[in-house]
Amino acid sequence: MSTTLNAIKALSREQMAARAAADIPEGWFVNLGIGMPTLVADYVTGREVIFHAENGILGVGPKPAAAEVNPWVINAGKQYVSLLPGASIMNSAESFGIIRGGHLDLAVLGGYEVAANGDLANWSTGQNNIAPAVGGAMDLGAGAKQVWVLMDHVTKTGQPRLVERCTYPVTALGTVTRVYTNLAVVEITERGFELVECAPGVSFEDVQARTGAALHRR
Amino acid sequence: MIDKFVPDIASALAGIGDGASIMLGGFGAIGMPTALVDHLAEMGVRNLTIIANNAGAAFGGMTRLLESGCIGKVICSYPRSADSSLFDSLYRDGKIALELTPQGTLAERIRCAAAGIPAFFTPTGAGTLLRADKETREINGRLCVLEHALFADVALLEAWEADRWGNLTYRLAGRNFNPIMAGAAKLTIAQTQHVVELGAMDPDAVMTPGIFVNRVVHVPYGDPTI
C-alpha cells in the first residue's frame, strides 16, 4: 500500500448505512441483516418501506423507548423492536417462504467477501475452533430479488474484501447486486465490479488499489 | 370428555426417555417453553437430540439443558449466543454433535414432516460447503439441493392461550417455530400462559388446531426476557 492511501477519509458505519438507505425506494419489502445493516432502517425516512424480520414479522418499526418495550416483539438480532400500524406476524415457515419465494425486494447483509461474479461469503471464516452458525443467511442470499452488502472495503489488515473469487466458504452463488463500503458504491454487472460512486475525497484509483479484482468505470 | 390438560409439568413430560429427539419452539428466548425445558434438564435422561433454531445458545432454559449433559446432538441454525461460550466448549470437546441447517431449510423440513412431504428441493445452500453432501438437481435453470423432512419424538411448545381440546394461539413474535413443530412430532406438549373455556377461542383465531396437540400444561409465568 502506498503512503497516499492512508490519507483517505473513509465513511463511518452510520454514513455507509445512510448511503445504502438513500437507494431504497418507497414500497419495497426489505430484510436487514444483523449488525451494521440494521442501522439502515434509521435512515429510511419520509417514505413507506416495509421491513421484514425473519423470525416472523413484516412491518418492523424502530427500537422502542424503554417504557414502551413489548417483551414479545424482537427482531432476528434478538433486540426489542416495535410494530408499525399494518404489521403482521407469521410463523417461521411462512417467513422463510417470503424469503425463498422471491417476495422480498431486497436483503441488506453484512459480508466477509464479495466476488466479482456476485458470490457472497458471510457465514463462516472457515476456522474450526468455534461451532459454525448460519441462521438465515443462506436463505436470504438465495431468495431475495436483490442482495446488497454493507461492509468495510478492506479487512483490518488491509486485505481486499472485494475479490476475484471468494476465499471464505460461500453463502450463496452469484447473488450480490451492489456493495456499499466505507470507500465506494460498487455494482456487480456482467463485466464484474463497476464503480457507481466514490466517497468524498476518494478517487477511482484509490478504490481500485484496495479492490482484489478489476474495477470498471461506468 | 376430551381434556388434554395435565396437572403439572412432570405429568406433561412423563414418558420421555433416553435417546429421544425433541423439538423446542422459540426464536431466542421468545416463545421457548422454558418451564418444560427446565424440567427436562432435571429428568436424568441421556443422549437427547434437540431440534431448535437456537439449540446451543444460552437462554430460555438451554443453559441448564446443556450443563445437565443430557444432550447428545443438536440440530439448529444458530448455536451461538453473544454472552456464552458453553456450547462452543462442549462442541470443541466432542461432547455434543451439531447438525447445522439454514434457518429456512430447518423450518421447511419441520413443516414438511407435519404435512407428510418426505423431502423437497430448495435453492438455499446450493453450491455451499454446508450442503456439499446433498443430492442436487437443476430445476428451472437453478441449482437446488434435496432436503429431507425432519421428524421428532416430542415437540415442546409455548402457547399464549389453550383450551381443553388443545387448540392454541401464540403471542406476537413468540409464534415462530411453535405452530410448525406441532404435528412434526409423535407427542406434542404445550405450556400455555392462559387457559380458556372450550368455545371461547374464535375459530378464526386458532393458530394450531387441537388435532396436533397431545398434552397442555398451564404455566402462567408472565413475560419472557431476552
Image (cartoon, rainbow, N blue to C red):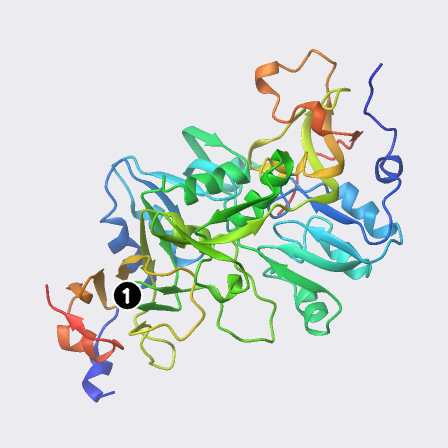
How far across and how far down the image is residue A15, in percent? 28, 59
Residue at the extreme left of the image, as rendered = A218
How many numbered circles are shown?
Answer: 1
The residue located at (81%, 61%) in the rendering is B69
Residue at the extreme bottom of the image, as rendered = A2
Asked if one can make out residue A216 in the rendered structure from this viewpoint, the answer is: yes
Image height check: is B102 above or below A153?
Answer: above
Quarter occupied by the N terminus of chain B: top right
In screen coordinates, is B218 left or right of A99?
A: right
In screen coordinates, is A166 left or right of B66?
A: left
Q: What element carries label 1?
A: loop
Query: Label 1 lies in what chain?
Result: A
In screen coordinates, is A17 left or right of B222?
A: left
Q: Residues within 10 Å of mark 1 (few under 14, many from 20)?
A: many
The residue located at (37%, 52%) in the rendering is B142
Q: Nearer the viewer, residue A103 or B119?
A: B119
**What residue does disc 1 label?**
A117
How far across and how far down the image is residue A55, in percent? 52, 43
Write down the quadrant of residue A60 in the picture: top left
Image height check: is A91 above or below B169?
Answer: below
In screen coordinates, is A77 left or right of A3?
A: right
How far across and how far down the image is residue A86, in percent? 40, 27
The residue located at (72%, 52%) in the rendering is B50
Image height check: is B137 above or below B223?
Answer: below
The residue located at (45%, 53%) in the rendering is B124
Amino acid at the residue labelled 1: Asn
How far across and how far down the image is residue B67, in percent? 79, 61
Asked if one can make out residue A198 in the rendered structure from this viewpoint, the answer is: no
